[in-house]
Image: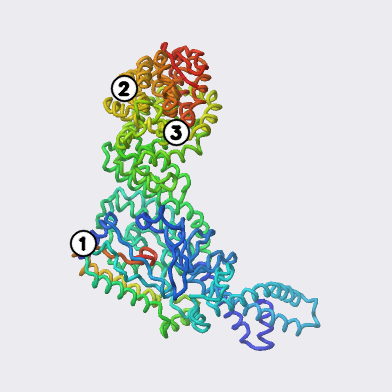
Amino acid sequence: FLLHRCPWLTKAISPAIPVYNGLVFLFVLANFSMATFMDPGVFPRADEDEDKDDDFRAPLYKNVEIKGIQVRMKWCATCHFYRPPRCSHCSVCDNCVEDFDHHCPWVNNCIGRRNYRYFFLFLLSLSTHMVGVFTFGLIFVLNHMEKLGAAHTTITMAVMCVAGLFFIPVIGLTGFHIVLVARGRTTNEQVTGKFRGGVNPFTRGCCGNVEHVLCSPLAPRLLFLLMVTIERLIRYIVEPKKKQAVSVKPPFLRPDLSERQITVKISDNGIQANLNRSKSKISLEGLEDKSMDVQPPLPPKGDPSKYSELTGQLGASEEGGLSPKLISPPTPAMYKYRPAFSNNPKVHYHAAPEQISMQEGHSQGALIEEDGRSLDYQSEPSLDIPSYRKSSLHKTYQSSPLQIDSFAISSRSLSLKSAGRRGTDKVPLHPMKSEGAASTPYKSIFSPNSLSNRNGSLSYDSLLNPMSPSGRKCIAHSAVGSVGYHSPYLSAKMCHLRGSELQRQPPQSFSPVLGGPAPHQRDPSPVRYDNLSKTIMASIQERKEMEEREKLLHSHPDSVFADSGVYDTPSSYSLQQVSTLSEDPRSMAMRYGSRDNLTAATSFSTRNPILQSSVSSLSSAMTRAPRTSTTSLQADLANNNVQAHQALQGRVSNGSYKSPGHQVPSSPTGMPRSPSYGGPKAVSFVNTVEITEVQSVGAQRDDMQLKTPHSKINGQPKGITRLGSTSSSQGTPVSPARHSNVKKVSGVGGTTYEISV
Amino acid sequence: QVHSLQELRRSASLATKVFVQRDYSDGTTCQFQTKFPPELESRIERQLFEETVKTLNSFYAEAEKIGGSSYLEGCLACATAYFIFLCMETHYEKVLKKISKYIQEQNEKIYAPRGLLLTDPLERGMRVV
């Protein structure tokens, strides 16, 4: 248009036309850029500490009164705060935006408080521009009617048509927004019909609204968009070793950034500062890591100076921002990163505590490794966030397999173990801190990890249940893969934790008579136990055997699991018991209840990577238990030295303890009790025992049968049994007696199991 | 003093936090509740705290005020195709700087001696103090 017609128009009408059109066009472009690249008023995610109270107990809505009208504030699960009025969460941008209007696809940005004016002006100017183009084109054509076929005219006509075509929707939208501005509403409010009743608490009157839109000062950018190149980010992360002091500063004014000399191309746009967030997180982590020294290299900056620096940078970036080219490429990247980043902060936090714990840890190697890992995490944020998250998760878990100080941790570790246990030879004694920290972010994943066994188990349950069908397999496999010795230790530790936890919770259900407690015991998630047993199994069993068992048992676990969720909890309880037992045989006595058997079994299994030893210890522990069930278990355990695993896993099924070989004699007595005892424990034990047995013989069938009565535990036991079976490849003659209700299964080394179906 | 403040900040992440939420009674203007949080009952005088919050509120009100200067700013920005933002900081930003200075000063004088630290709302997205 400009090229073709301006010369003529200039000559024909006035020289002002191209100038005018140029100006309008420039105006359109400027507003468009501002609307596109300006941060619409994104609210950064709330820090962890801010939402800790709210996250789980938060009611979804909070009422607040605005100018006499009740307005509901909704809790934003992604951003972790109650959305201020007129704030809405944009799913495209994955951010809460202040005064959220809409997400404009043409501009590919949210329209919110800060850029609404530019958006509005953009619409106006665009309309004007189109009108102008159309008019002038019309004039041109009219003036050249005689030469309609000429190239110039045709092109002009084409341009006119396009302009005319686009004119209609643009005008429509412009008019719509004019109405909105007059009413003082946002598109969001209009579309959702919030104020259909007519009362809008946000309106300032027609004139006031217009004035507000056009003249209000530019609100501050709450989320500073720092487009840090990846290299910079990595460099930044790698540098933390240098202990650059990171002062706790507002996340957006972190001196770290300038410290690291990250090219901050702060673009005054809508690109969400996920990177910024991550950066702030990283800096936070770094801060924690570095013991928060004031960084010497960083020129001391007061807040204002930092701010000005940032703003200066912002200014610089604005320049860049104004050129679409600069900004647009990062935008998609930012968007890409954003979800990851939004998830990352938590991970980062974990990494950081991990780092910290690592630093405090004992082994340098582990420390370095952890640091490296956390560094890796940090360096990866923009690159590979999902994997990072996962890896960090796993690493977090794996790195602290033995950090089972707290119940929560243990539960987590258990879950971790189930998730994918790898022999962690180097188990730095990470302070539980990391675990704790890790738990925090994952609380969303796991139900709140309270110290109560039940809660933990429940959370674990939630974790395990979904994955039970697959998880078992995975667990089994992972168990197989895990280092034999380590996992028992790990599991032992876990048992410890559990045991300790168990101790904390008076075993209500533990009664000499298994009948009573059993129902109670069911509640705690047996999952824990399962995990533990799995660990044990893994350590003992060979992978092949496990896989074999898996196949065999797969059918069962599913069914078994389906059977009793209740059982799961008891098993966890039992697991705990076991752990306790492992720690202190005497404590086992404490636990005696139906769980004792299990704990005994687990304890000794955990203690000794070697089945036999564990079995023996367990059996010894068991001997303490006056209960018949326990005794049976003990006996089983004793017999099952060879099949230590089995003993461990020989969860006392309902009424039947599967201890390799031990239980046969006493099982009948024990077995009847076990049902009340809590299948889960028994099951788990049995499973473990079974597994060992199964190995040697087609005990898998037995296992499976054993498992059937046991609900969830079976799932775990299956893995265990698999393991057990693998370990007991020594040829445990699993007696076909298993098939009967009270089966006597002879495990490895001549141990017989009694499994009550 | 800056140093001590920074140290305070460092430890702030480990300290107990009390959040002063925003007060939306006047619409979406940025105001903070002057209600005295019970956790601070023993640590600082009610009067001092309220005064701090009120001052902050007044600062924010000033920042958001639509006046001649802000109008001119807008026009100028528009006229220069918003290039002006590269050179100049907006009225709001100026006020924000004032606010952060004020907060720092308050921290030094009043809150640090009591072992408290006031964080700039800007850090948390203007949602809490």
Is residue A508 rendered to the left or right of residue A687?
left
Distance between the alpha carbons at the discs numbered 1 and 3: 48 Å
Amino acid type, label 2: Ala
**Mark 3 neighbour density, 10 Å: few (under 14) some (14–19) many (20 or more):** many
For the residues labelled 3 and 2, the Cα–Cα distance comes to: 23 Å
**Marks 3 & 2 on one chain:** yes
The mark found on residue B115 in the picture is 1
Q: Are marks 1 and 2 in contact (CB under 8 Å)?
A: no
Is residue A446 among what the camera can see? yes
Residue position for label 3: A568
Q: Position of residue A565 (x, y in %)?
A: 48, 35
Q: Amino acid at mark 3?
A: Asp
User: Observer-nearest residue: A303 or B41?
Assistant: B41
**Inter-mark Cα distance, 1 to 2:** 55 Å
Q: Position of residue A473 (x, y in %)?
A: 50, 30
Q: Residues within 10 Å of mark 1 (few under 14, many from 20)?
A: few
Q: Chain of mark 1?
A: B
Q: Chain of mark 2?
A: A
Label annotation for residue A625: 2
Discs 3/2, front: 2
Question: Circle 2 — which element?
Answer: loop
Q: Position of residue A477 (x, y in %)?
A: 48, 29
